Image (cartoon, rainbow, N blue to C red):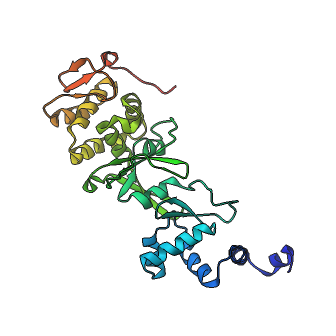
Amino acid sequence: MADATTFRAQFSNLELLKYAYTVVMESRGLGSQSRERLGRLLRNEPAVLTPESAARTLALTREQAAHELARWARAGWLARVRRGAYAPVPLQAASADIALEDPWSVATALFAPCYIGGWSAAEHWGLTEQIFRSVCVITGQRPRERRPRLRGTEFVLHSIRPDRIFGTQSVWRGRTRVAVSDPARTLVDMLADPGLGGGIRPVADMLVEFRREHGALAPRLIEHATRLGNGAVFKRLGFLLERDTGPNAELIEACRANLRKGYIRLDPALPADHLVSRWGLWIPAAWRQAPIERSRP
């Protein structure tokens, strides 16, 4: 067999890659037809392969595609993510026991219709410097398992109606286009459910950061909240804006105009013993102080 120097002289980098790919495939016991099929599946660098997607690409039945995927997984070319879902194994990987290369792309493939939201979107837009270990996914599905751990990555799934999936932007992750909530929708989601931001205290800080870095998008807070139709958002937003010393009169008035009857807690996870009647909010005693000014450290 010719040495590596000879190959480099005779072939381009792409040809060398194809040659190495074929040699490794043959060493793992894949015939020419199987190599061709797997190559077609991997051509567009998918984050996840399923029997349905493989069947469409290869013109096979779902059962045939499932059989092929399972066989390639046994050969070490694919890593099983969960039942019926496989991730490609990089050529340089020592084994099929790999972590997910890009969890956002995997989430898009497994939980669609969905978008990346909550604390994960807040990190993406620079609203927080806090590091979260899990990926927050807002999905139109109703999964039985809300915190699946796939290949070492924990996903936290929050369900909404599919018609409430709006206010997102597309970002490219490799060759996969992933939807992530825009800065305003990210805040609105966390005001609707403070748990999506790690609690109302970090959400309040993210609101300040939002107004500092994305102030021109402030009207979208009202637009998204109105379309979402969640009255709790206006109560929490109006209260938090009053605590901020910035010029919030127009936003506060918009929150007042959208108030609904009834009382809620500022954060359902916190005890609340003081009622702020103008906002219909029960708040913890520690939140009773006058408006405060936060500044970047």
Report the quarter where the N terminus lies: bottom right
Q: Farthest residue in the bottom direction?
A: 33
Residue at image location 37% in from the left, 59% down from the top: 112
**115 in relation to 232, above or below:** below
The number of numbered discs placed on residues in the rendered structure image is 0
Q: Is residue 132 above or below residue 162?
A: above
Nearer the observer, 67 or 44: 67
Residue sitting nearer the eye, 211 or 40:
40
Res 253 → quadrant: top left
Residue 173 can be seen, yes or no: no
132 relative to 215 in the view: left or right? right
Vertical arrangement, residue 189 with respect to residue 274, above or below: below
Residue 226 in the image: state x and y as whole percent.
Answer: 21, 44
**Residue 153 horizontal/vertical position (percent):** 52, 48
Q: Which residue: 86% across, 76% down?
A: 3
Question: Residue 78's x, y, as percent?
Answer: 58, 66
Q: Is residue 194 visible?
A: yes
Along the horizontal axis of the image, is 170 left or right of 242?
right
On the image, the x and y values in percent for residue 131 come to 52, 37
Above or below: residue 271 compared with residue 147:
above
| Picture quadrant of residue 60 | bottom left
Residue visible at 57% across and 72% down in the picture? 71
